[in-house]
Amino acid sequence: MVGDSTEFWRQTVLETVLITALAHLHQDPPTVPCSHEEMIRQIDTMQQSHGNHVDIQLLGTSLHGLSIPLITIVHDGPVAAEDRPALLIVGGLDSTHPASSRFVMDIAKELAASDDCPILAERTVYLVPRANPDAYEWMRQSPVNRGTNARSIDEDRDREFDEDGPDDLNGDGVITRMRVFDPDKADRMEDPEESRLDKKPDPSKSERAEFYVTSEGIDNDGDGQLNEDPPGGVNLDMNFMHNYPYHDDLSGRWQLSEPESHALANFLLDHPRIITVMTYGIHDNLARKPSESGQNKSGVPNTLDAKDVDFYTTISDRYIEITGYAPAPTVGTDGSFHGWVYAQLGMPSFTTPGWNMPTKGKSKDKQAPADQPGNDAKADANSLTPSPVGDISMETLTELMEYAQSQGMQVDETRMSRLTVEMVENYSKMAGIEVRRIKTAEPAQATKTSKKEKSPWLEYIDEQRDGEGFVQWQWHDHPEYGRVQIGGWIPGYRMTPPEEEFDEVARKQAAFLVQLMDLYPRLELEDLQVKRLSRNIYEVEATLVNDGFMPAGTAMASKNRRSRPHVVRIGVDKESIVSGTPVHKTWTVPGSGGRNKYRWIIEHPDGEPIQVSVYSEKFGSLSQSHQTSELKEQGQ
């Protein structure tokens, strides 16, 4: 249960000691979220400035005892906060996206200050800016940032915990990548046209592999494996029930094994008036057009039910129109919070990184819906994520892993680490998966003197951010591998806007969320018609209408029936019903004027009113009554 505001502020008294106990001396990485203490101060300031709109409670506590604050924003309106349709916004599940927590805090400030927004008088907004506070405190004090909570795990099964993680060998405060020059394992070479990039060698051009790429570090425990047991922890965004990845160390011992994920799930279950959930994190189904992608063995959609794609697509179009951001790379959703909200609770669940590299004008014309042939090769070629397997993109590996798991195969990181390019190509062919590579081939008509297009991200940082974000490759003497090169992208950089753009991001996101809440279902009971068929016999018809855009119940909700239905009753005893069902259970009412009709023939005393009522867990109670005293028998 959510604690009251007194409990929240009592909790904060303990936190200075706890945070100090976690602290140790490391240089801050270039992109650093505010401390937990500072976040609490910002929440306190917001409440003091907008006290009539803002309430603060305690959602739960982390594994190390830090508070997980819950912000509730309620503007003055005719309906009590707990009875309004609500929106839940969650950030900070995974600290590998450092800015997501700040995005939610900034959105809270925007919404709290929006006095002239009519829809906020009809809705309640819940915000969890930092669902994984331990991870954020850890990343502020250590260059090793896995995004997990603080639980120690023996990942290499040697009865020692967290003893071999990445190491900041060059002392720059971040963990980047390492080029290891081993001819027996080498599968990459430096790109001759852009030294910051590497590529798969082309034997036809007499190119030779020079190195392989791995995470910066040493073999701390001398077991012959590199960085196989880093500090932490459970990835909270893999700890939920939908497609839960069993036997993966990062997913936890069992579903909702962690206090942070458990508190979040309990809150959702205890607040049935929440209509949609918005998650700011590493996944994207807004700038990236949503699509249906089949079902797993249990019959659950891997992404969306086909009948929900249309309204998701319309909302995605609104998001792209408002923000103008390009789609983020595809990331696996097994065990994710937003996947669980949709697939098992049947609620509309949206997720976005919140910001992406600005695209040039011509780039928008190239974007196409994700379900159109060739879209991945065209729209995503510039945002694919490198993987440890040659030039195979991480998106391909993720899709291949999800396919294997859907077929009942056990897939873990050890197996994935043994993959070669040839194995990926063969497995993908058998699974019908397109192999997407991080660098596409040059057009056949290109001349020998023509230069291929520069990496968009490198072009962006060179032109707009003075080259920051990428650590130039530098030689380093490694105690085990000899001369290596250390460099690459700073973790989290490509998810974090420049400081001067945070306000604009908050305004765009708040504007989208206001539109999203305006698209909520609006149920009305209409057209109650009563006909007198004979003495004390009546025909009754009623219509449940949804005047909002979104359906009152997704196709997934109708299928899994986890959410309670809209219950339509006629106000007579069961024995008085001649024809029709005493109670109609309706799991969905289509949006944009969708209508569900109900009909009964009843025995009822002449002159007595007839009432039809609706109870909806998410939308409350509706009723209409009809006087029968002046009705004439049909045909008279």
Image (cartoon, rainbow, N blue to C red):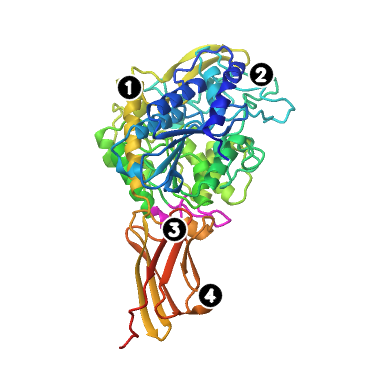
How many angstroms separate mark 4 from mark 3 (CA)?
Answer: 21 Å
For the N terminus, give its image quadrant: top right
Q: How dense is the environment of label 4, judged by Cα within 10 Å: few (below 14), some, or many (20 and up)?
A: few
**Type of the residue with mark 3:** Ser
Q: Which residue is mark 2?
A: 220
Which secondary structure is most common in the magenta stretch? Answer: loop
Tag 1 or tag 2, which sits nearer the N-term?
2
Image point 59% across, 37% down: which residue? 416
Tell me: 491 left or right of 527: right
Dot label at residue 375: none
How many angstroms separate mark 2 from mark 4 (CA)?
Answer: 74 Å
Q: How dense is the environment of label 1, judged by Cα within 10 Å: few (below 14), some, or many (20 and up)?
A: few
How many angstroms separate mark 1 from mark 4 (CA)?
Answer: 65 Å
How many angstroms separate mark 3 from mark 2 (CA)?
Answer: 63 Å
Tag 3 or tag 4, which sits nearer the N-term?
4
Q: Nearest the camera: 340 or 87?
A: 87
> Looking at the picture, does residue 584 appear above or below residue 389?
below
- Residue 426 appears in the figure: no
Q: Secondary structure at mark 2?
A: loop
**Type of the residue with mark 4:** Lys
- Residue 327 appears in the figure: yes
Q: Secondary structure at mark 1?
A: helix
Question: How many numbered discs, if any?
Answer: 4
Tell me: 585 left or right of 77: right
Q: Which residue is mark 3?
A: 621
